[in-house]
């Protein structure tokens, strides 16, 4: 089956995000580069992303969005929600662990790394790297809490090419529905909040700004995409990326 999307498939690369960056002048908006294996896959906070060759979806999307730099978190919201919707279509209930990891219960099934290039007040390009665990069932013991689509739904066989097409269909709908529409971002934020992992549940966190553990409850996100957490006294505090750590 021929894909209707602009997808380049590679056997192996160092990092799909880096590969997109090297080819960026030749790629159009919504171009996709997917590899069966990566030798230097990257995740958030400088972590590596390991994956068994040929088992999982490892891909990057080039976006040239009409989005202001201040609103860049909307890209993370759309990309994350599209993964949640894809999983739901295969009978897997998932949530978004802020800012954009995807969890099934307390296990990570997908990681997302978004690298934006800013020009003036707008995003010039956004390279969206996604690693979705699909058919892998054995993981490195050093990984704390991985899972996959096959582990979450063992009754279904998953084809990587079909899955990627399905994801791009969903993401395209989000881009068309919420970009450049009055009030679209507000509705998008509501949808994202409804899918947040640990929303309104007490859990333990580390406030990295003061190196202190605390019990808190996620209440939502700010307009800038910061995480809003209430402590046990009900006091609210906003956290930017890397300012708070989740204890799983």
Image (spheres, rainbow, N blue to C red):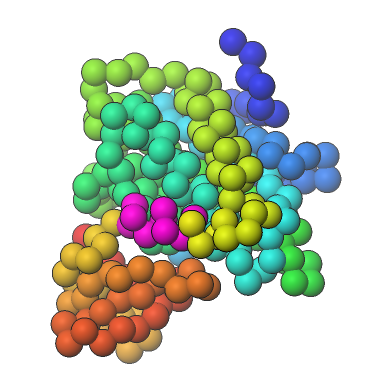
Residue 13 % position (x, y) = 61, 37
Residue 133 % position (x, y) = 38, 36
The answer to whether 181 is drawn above or below residue 69 in the figure is above
Kindly identify the residue that appears in the image at 60 percent across and 38 percent down.
172
Q: Considering depth in this image, is 23 or 141 the residue closer to the camera?
A: 23
The residue furthest right is 25
The answer to whether 149 is drawn above or below residue 29 in the figure is above
For the N terminus, the quadrant is top right
- Taking the image as shown, residue 202 lies to the left or right of residue 116, namely left
Magenta region, residue range:
188-196
Residue 14 % position (x, y) = 59, 42
Query: Does residue 183 show up?
Result: yes
Asked whether 243 falls inside the magenta stretch, the response is: no
Residue 112 % position (x, y) = 48, 50
- Dividing the picture into quadrants, the one containing residue 110 is top left
- Taking the image as shown, residue 109 lies to the left or right of residue 126, namely left
Kindly identify the residue that appears in the image at 28 percent across and 69 percent down.
218
Kindly identify the residue that appears in the image at 83 percent across and 39 percent down.
26
Kindly identify the residue that appears in the image at 73 percent across and 50 percent down.
64
- Predominant SS along the magenta part: helix
The residue furthest front is 182
Query: Does residue 44 show up?
Result: no
Q: Total of numbered circles in the picture?
A: 0
The answer to whether 80 is drawn above or below residue 204 in the figure is above
- Taking the image as shown, residue 74 lies to the left or right of residue 44, namely right
For the C terminus, the quadrant is bottom left
- Dividing the picture into quadrants, the one containing residue 88 is top left
């Amino acid at each position: 089956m021929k894909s209707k999307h602009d997808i380049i498939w590679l056997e192996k690369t160092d990092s799909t995000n880096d590969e997109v960056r090297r080819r960026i002048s030749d790629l159009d908006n919504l171009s996709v580069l997917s590899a069966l294996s990566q030798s230097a896959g990257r995740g958030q906070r400088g972590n590596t992303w390991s994956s068994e060759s040929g088992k999982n979806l490892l891909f990057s999307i080039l976006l040239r969005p009409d989005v202001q730099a201040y609103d860049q978190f909307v890209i993370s919201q759309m990309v994350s929600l599209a993964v949640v919707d894809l999983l739901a279509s295969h009978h897997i209930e998932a949530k978004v662990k802020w800012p954009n990891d995807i969890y099934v219960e307390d296990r990570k099934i997908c990681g997302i790394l978004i690298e934006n290039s800013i020009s003036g007040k707008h995003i010039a390009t956004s390279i969206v790297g996604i690693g979705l665990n699909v058919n892998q069932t054995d993981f490195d013991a050093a990984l704390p809490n991985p899972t996959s689509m096959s582990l979450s739904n063992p009754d279904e066989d998953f084809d990587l090419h079909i899955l990627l097409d399905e994801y791009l269909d969903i993401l395209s709908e989000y881009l068309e529905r919420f970009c450049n529409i009055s009030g679209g971002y507000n509705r998008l934020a509501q949808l994202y909040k409804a899918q947040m992992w640990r929303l309104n549940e007490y859990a333990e966190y580390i406030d990295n700004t003061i190196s202190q553990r605390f019990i808190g409850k996620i209440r939502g996100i700010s307009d800038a995409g910061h995480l809003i957490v209430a402590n046990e006294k009900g006091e609210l505090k906003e956290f930017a990326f890397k300012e708070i750590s989740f204890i799983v």
